[in-house]
Image: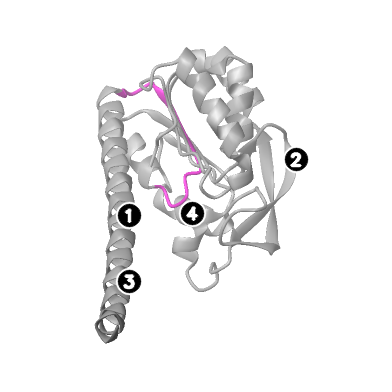
Amino acid sequence: MSGDQDRRPDEAADAARVDALEARLVKLRRREKRNLRHARAHGFLDGVLALLRPGDIAIDCGANLGEVTTLLADTGAEVIAFEPDPYAFARLGARFAGGANVTLHQKAVSTGAGRVRLMRAANFDDNPKGGSVKSTLLAGGRGISESDGIEVEVIDFVAFLRDLVADRGPVAFLKMDIEGAELDLLEAMDAGGLFADIRCTVAETHENKFKDLRPRYRALREALGRKYTARHVNLDWI
């Protein structure tokens, strides 16, 4: 009996170590999957950049500080960038001052026009550069302060696209990273058949931040997957 009692603490310690190792393995696999997704997205973008030419139209929705906007502009394409957060937009303006082929709009994009409340990350004041990428129109996001917000202008992006295509022809590239607001917008674009007028669309979806919306995200992925190849509409952006 005493032997069994002596072994129990060791067995408990072994079990705890196994649990810790399994938890670490899950974390490492998740990180590996994320890194692989990022690598694929960067490779995909490199391919897009190689094909863009002066005269092409590229749109950056959720431009933030302009990392992707810069890459697009360097191809000579005409870049239209949307960024509603005043902090990020001020830095965009300084970065692209005098840029002949970049047009900046301090506006959010959605399915309707007007004024909306932009909510920021809870740690925005401590880290505005890092926090600005999380600014969102959608309540319920992880790490977002819903009690504070700023009013920003929003445009009807579906109408904007229709007018742009009617005036200038097909859009070469659309990138969308708008922290959850992409769901309504992508659904509306699909319903309006707008993807046919965009050679390539990439979007980062945010179902991990908005758990209640996961069924709609899943349905959207399935619907777009049946209609378009991943080279045409890619929802696995960074």
Which corner quadrant of the image does residue 5 belong to?
A: bottom left
In this view, the residue in front, 180 or 6, is 6
Q: Is residue 150 above or below residue 203?
A: below
Disc 1 + disc 3, Cβ < 8 Å: no
Amino acid on which the number 1 mark rests in the picture: Val
Residue mark closest to the camera, 3 vs 4 = 3
For residue 16, which numbered disc appears in the image?
3
Q: Is residue 60 shown in magenta?
A: yes
Question: Which percent across, then down, holds residue 6?
Answer: 26, 84
Residue mark closest to the camera, 4 vs 2 = 4
Q: Residues within 10 Å of mark 3 (few under 14, many from 20)?
A: few
Amino acid on which the number 4 mark rests in the picture: Val
For residue 133, which numbered disc appears in the image?
4
Disc 3 + disc 4, Cβ < 8 Å: no
Q: Residues within 10 Å of mark 2 (few under 14, many from 20)?
A: few
For residue 114, which numbered disc appears in the image?
2
Q: Is residue 196 above or below residue 67?
A: above
